[in-house]
Image (cartoon, rainbow, N blue to C red):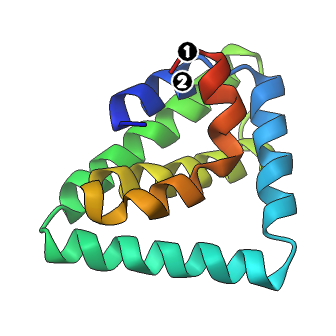
Amino acid sequence: MDLLAFGQSLGALRIADIRSIAAHEAASRDSIAGEVEVRRATLHVERVLRATQRRNHAAMAGLTVVSLVQGAARRDGVELPDRDVTRVARAAELVARALVGGPASERDARLLATAFDRVSLRSGA
């Protein structure tokens, strides 16, 4: 998955997709082990971004994907703030940051994007 394809899949989300992704995210973080795994991946991504001097690019990518998720929700008539939209937007931001990290954070991106897999594949991304 690359950042452009990920963004395109987010732009095509429907609110049912957002709710499904949010439920998957919540379930995956219910366990301490799941939460620790996500935290480790996030910390590794941040180290990679700092070492490669890509933190600004990652910030812009994160802002872009948050806007895409919010725009998809608004298009389906969801009034913001919405708990599920916020959860998915935050998860998408983590994935985008990992994708900006390139090959050094590829494994982290795959781990962080687990909840998005079904939707991304279905939308052709």
Residue 101 visible from this viewpoint: no
* Camera-side residue of 58 and 110: 110
Identify which residue is drawn at 87% across, 60% down.
27
Residue 37, above or below 8: below
Helix, strand or loop at mark 1:
loop
Q: Residues within 10 Å of mark 1 (few under 14, many from 20)?
A: few
Where does label 2 land, which residue?
Answer: 9
Residue 80 position in % (x across, y down):
71, 37
Q: Residues within 10 Å of mark 2 (few under 14, many from 20)?
A: many
Using the image, tell me which numbered label, if any, was put on residue 111: none
Residue 26 position in % (x across, y down):
83, 59
Residue 98 position in % (x across, y down):
39, 58
Identify which residue is drawn at 46% across, 39% down.
65
Residue 3, above or below 55: above
Give the left or right position of residue 90, taking residue 8 as reference.
right
Q: Quadrant of residue 37?
A: bottom right
Who comes first in sequence, dot 1 or dot 2? Answer: 2
Q: Is the residue under label 2 in contact with that under label 1 (CB below 8 Å)?
A: yes
Give the left or right position of residue 75, taking residue 110 as reference.
right
Give the CA separation, mark 1 to mark 2. 8 Å
* Camera-side residue of 26 and 34: 34
Which amino acid type is shown beneath numbered disc 2?
Ser
Identify which residue is drawn at 31% across, 56% down.
59
Residue 24, above or below 36: above
Q: In which quarter of the image is the N terminus?
A: top left
Where does label 1 land, which residue?
Answer: 124
Helix, strand or loop at mark 2:
helix
Identify which residue is drawn at 65% across, 37% down.
117
Give the left or right position of residue 57, taking residue 19 as reference.
left
Give the left or right position of residue 106, taking residue 83 as reference.
left
Which amino acid type is shown beneath numbered disc 1?
Gly
Residue 53 position in % (x across, y down):
12, 68
